[in-house]
Image (cartoon, rainbow, N blue to C red):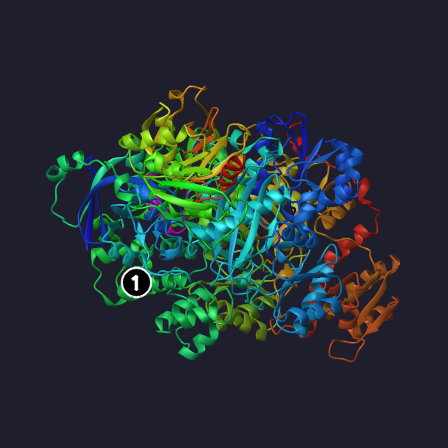
Amino acid sequence: MPRNKEIKKVLVIGSGPIVIGQAAEFDYAGTQACRSLREEGVEVVLINSNPATIMTDGDIADKVYIEPLTVPVLKSLIEKEKPDSILPTLGGQAGLNLGMELAESGFLEEKGVKLIGTTAETIRKAEDRLEFKKTMEKIAEPCAPSMIVENLEDGIAFAKQIGYPVVLRPAYTLGGSGGGIAANEGELREILANGLRLSRVGQVLVERSIAGWKEIEYEVMRDGAGNVITVCNMENIDPVGVHTGDSIVVAPSQTLGDKEYQMLRSAALNIIDELKITGGCNVQFALHPESLEYCVIEVNPRVSRSSALASKATGYPIAKVAAKIALGYNLDEIKNAVTGETYASFEPALDYCVVKLPRLPFDKFITAKRTLTTQMKATGEVMSICGCFEGALMKAIRSLEQHVQSLAVNDFSHLTRRELIRRLDVVDDQRIYVIAEAIRKGIERETIHDMTQIDRWFIDKIAVLVEMEQRLRNEELTPELLREAKRMEFPDETIAELSGKEKEEIRRMRSAEGIFASFKMVDTCAAEFKAVTPYFYSVYGGEDESGELPGTGKEKKVLVLGSGPIRIGQGIEFDYCSVHAAWAFEKAGYETVIVNNNPETVSTDFDIADKLYFEPLTEEDVENIVRIEKPDGAVVQFGGQTAIKLTEALMRMGVPILGTSAENVDKAEDRELFDEVLSETGIRRPAGHTVFTEEEAIKAAKDLGYPVLVRPSYVLGGQGMRIAFHDGELREFIGIINRVAQDHPILVDKYMMGKELEVDAVSDGKDILIPGIMEHIERAGIHSGDSISVYPARTISERVKELVTDYTKRLAMALKVKGMINIQYIAMDEEVYCIEVNPRSSRTVPYISKVTGIPIVELAARAIMGESIRGMGYEPGLAKPAEYYAIKMPVFSFEKIYGAETSLGPEMKSTGECLGISRDYNEALYKAFAGAGFRLPKYRQVILTVKDSDKAEIIGIGKRFEALGYRIYATRSTAKVLQENGVNALKVNKIHQESPNVLDLILGHKIDLVVDTPTQGFQKNRDGFLIRRISIETGVYCLTALDTVNALLDTMEHENPDGSLELYDIARVGKE
Amino acid sequence: MKAYLILEDGTRFAGESIGAKKDVISEIVFNTSMTGYPEILTDPSYAGQAVCLTYPLIGNYGICREDLQSSRPWPDALIVRECSRMASNFRSDITLQDYLEQYEIPGIAGIDTRALTKVLREKGTMNGMITTRSGLSYEEIRSDLEAYRTGDVVQKVSCRESYDVKTDQIQSREGEGLKVALLDVGMKKDIALSLAGRGLSVKVYPAWTKAEEILKEDPDGIMISNGPGDPKECGEIIGEIAKLSRAGIPIFAICLGHQLMALAHGGDTHRLKYGHRGGNHPVKDRESGRVYITSQNHGYVVDEASLPESVASAAFTNVNDGTNEGLSYQGKKIFTVQFHPEASPGPQDTSFLFDRFIKAMKG
């Protein structure tokens, strides 16, 4: 059917802040869909509370609302914009749930708005467990025996009937949130209670455990005429039991015969046909490893993380095609953009192997349990493509940027055979390394298979890699052996290490033997048709195709380095910057080449740059590309630390760094050099010393006076940063830092408790432009990424603003910055201290660009290319502040990571952010909290428990809660302070004291909020830790900084009914 | 052991020998299916050809005998990027290497199969030699390469005597009581099983069976199978098919059968540049507009224009290149398709055509 002309104005719902289970993939899908809709002349209204996304750019949609994703807000947006349709299937589970709530409430019908893409009935059939089961029974597609329960008793009874272990899956939750496997009644009680609470509809599915079966996924599409296709199938190396988001996934499936492949394919198509999906859909199966028995695990009637992965793995643009289908097109009416010749109604044929590895946050949450379960924990992922599985796995491992180059590095060699066998039973992120060690130790493959249930084929492939390690160790390195090692993608460094040679020797040998990487095209059709996709991956041994594309005819070529997997501290913001940089260079007439390895992102969409290389971001891999592409320059300042780290290597390869030079980047990051810059420019910073040993650190602290801030140099997101109050703590922290990175210097600074300010500026070498000054609500000491940030700064004086502007200019000039600079200051007693300078793009760039209407990345790119600030039409200095407040709120995923410490400090812990915009400060703050999911008051009961140094401040807070009608519970000493100061606080027992104690109170489900300020130090206060964890896990808000609490109280003291919020079209900013 | 592939145009690939260690000259074709190498190997349509699989990892799940499409592998050789040293599947009976060796099929692994595919795509299907002799030059074998023809391969692959098909895998009983004659011009087993599995009694006849002999048994329907080679090599068979088509009995034909039926009606066929071989080919039902993903394996195609509307009308069209994928004969219960509704390997989306055939027989 041709396009439905009745669809003229579509509301697209985004997925909100990045949390575990809902990440950048929805920016990719949403951006692609918005562009696809606008191509068809449809007016697109977009709502997403996440300002770090590309989809919320003014040029992706016609109208952009960065507003909280709540039903009342959506209702008033629909009233305001009057769209004729809503597309809810692109915003992940969050978007889908909102679309459903609007449809179910009858509001859409009343307003004459249609859900397009997939109908409410279809969504219900796929999402509601009971309906889904009924539907599957109708078409005879098997599901594991299961029952939906709404209370503990039914769950226990059913589990008894089907036998343990049982799997628990709450209905309507993110990334399997609150789910798990229970092996006995005790575990069942725990998980089920949590799941019931987390489910939107209070339902949890109790299911026969099919753990150990093969987990196979199909990404399928269906159009309105009933045409169905499979885009891709994927096999999880980790059998059922590990969330697919945390599994090692390979595409296409490797161990399925055609009979099994087609059996599941037909089942998937049957299912979407019965559900009447129109668009993309993900179907997950469990396949018995020793029979043809299978069952349907789950169906996601929308684009998903897996569909983003499938799109990147095949080159088939699922979201784009889904958007066209939503407009009424049939698959055979949509051109395949890859070949330009064929149509969307075909199935991609791969002639390579794809491996996805999850990026897990255990480096950030060292106290967390590393076990992988049905609850997703990964913050991001990497994908790699190669001609063989071994190569794809090796490339994926190094793409993770976790200082691991191969299976040989992670050290389990101290484990005995018996210990190893026991260790194989542990399902965590290190399992493949354990398997490799088990093979090294000669443990039988069958034993490994029995313990892990991982298919023997994958175990054999790991064995192939281990055998290569051993050959490299034991044999003479002949050209043939080297060629074979390179075919399996062993990096030169690893080959050198194993063969006892220098890396240079390996390089020379490769050069002499002509062993170089060549690049193959991802073309959706296994070379059957001529394709023009500029999408490449490397292989060793084979002809190079990257030169086959018709030339762009452009004179200059720039290499844009991406930012790799999404992790805490380096999120989607940097993808935003990379993409905008590529666009800016393209606009200026450059040929653009992007290198990245993150399948969730916009930057790895093959039509963003002239060429896309899906490769690890390591020196050797980038050099392979440089060898072929010979770029005129590279930009590294937009890809976060990942790209910055490659600066020196690029210079060695003879690639000029465009923008700020490497030498000046060093000046900002090397403490001593930076001190020189500061003294040259006459700018103060908190006093500090660079040390290497514990003794030096103690001496430095004595000199500075406690508290001191300690951190390793060259870090991401404040990793390893701590505030020490005495020698004992300092010793402990230095020990931890040295365990991770020994050769790097450690910084010890005086800790100043002032107001933290942040600017992003563009410098052309002569002038600077500061779009705005941001002010943090939490005082210094909490990582800027975890702080609530207010633009424009509202509590600082003109003098401080002038100082910030002046200092920023001085620093940019001193560091000869060309392009971006990000600086953090502390303002204290009307003085300004510089605490950090990053001569590169930062986390706040997307948000500040949007709210000021100043396209920072584009301006920075143009400055790099030689334009001046004035020449681009901007007045140098601090731009005029906007007429509204824009407040950035961090969003955390603590509930997903069992055992993670939730208290905030200098090390970043948030996974995402949302924005609140309003002319009124309190309304902006309210929107920011609402966007992050805060809905208070509920029961008007709060628990306060603070450390001694916060006791004075808690009195004011207590009074404010009391005035709001709250009943205040407090632990002994906090209660005492409150009572003494006239606040009516009820004393509760501590955890180890008799019931009813603070735990009972939290578990009573009648508490709105827990305020717990942790005692500093690494010997973590067990009580506090438990209180914080239990609050998070039972869905009680828990705040650990008093500044945040005061901000929350600000919003609660003002009436802000959701329905009457003023909604702000951010696309207008800068266009007016 | 090293092995080499030398193409008719002089292109040379070096790899490792797999399977039997012997030289072979054949027509080189590629297949883009990601699964189903056992079915491909035993598809008689590959007789006289050497097949290159574009999916690089082959042999992963070994060979399961019950999936095989005929009694033996038919390609002259197998060309792959990587032949798995391990066969991991609970149904696997034998590894791919052992299977190739058992039937003395040579092969080559470790070559850039994508580069080979591109040569075939750009220059068209061509002949080539697989050899383990390193010294062999292109000039030495050039004339042999050019002289190679697949020839009348149907004779080679068809069954020698007629037989009845038995199966215990019954999916439905809708065909019970009906008798089908199946003309084996290079049949894949699953064509017979698709019919027998629907309750039909199926009798398979050798390719050279006379029409009279088949009609004598008074079948309710006639099925003509897939098969190898240039349809125009099958002069006599075409004559018999022409006779069958005049008998007023419903006929369903697949692939080579589809081409032979067209030739029997005065139509024409021609060779495609590099054929359709894979499991992802979209075909459009001209009547309903529905698009189906199909399994295909053919190097020749029916010229749609060579058959007037009064004789046959196009029923299916390939979405990618617009070539004919199916014909419906006017005034007759004859329906033929170029693709493979029996799948194996490939998508099962068009298996409903067998039901359509039964319906035609019923009424």
Q: Is residue B80 magenta?
A: no
> What secondary structure is the magenta-colored segment mainly?
helix
Q: Which residue is mark 1?
A: A468
Give the x, y percent position of residue A535.
41, 39
**Which of A267/A633 is in front?**
A267
Give the x, y percent position of residue A519.
34, 43
Is residue A1038 among what the camera can see?
no
Q: Amino acid at mark 1?
A: Met
Q: Is residue A616 magenta?
A: yes
Near mark 1 (Cα within 10 A), the count class, few <14, some 14-19 or many ≥20, is many
**Which of B46/A812 is in front?**
B46
The quadrant of the image that shows the N terminus of chain A is top right
Q: In the picture shown, does residue A934 fall above or below B144? A: below
**Region in magenta:** A612-629
The quadrant of the image that shows the C terminus of chain A is top right
Is residue B14 among what the camera can see?
yes
Image mark 1: chain: A
Give the x, y percent position of residue A975.
82, 71
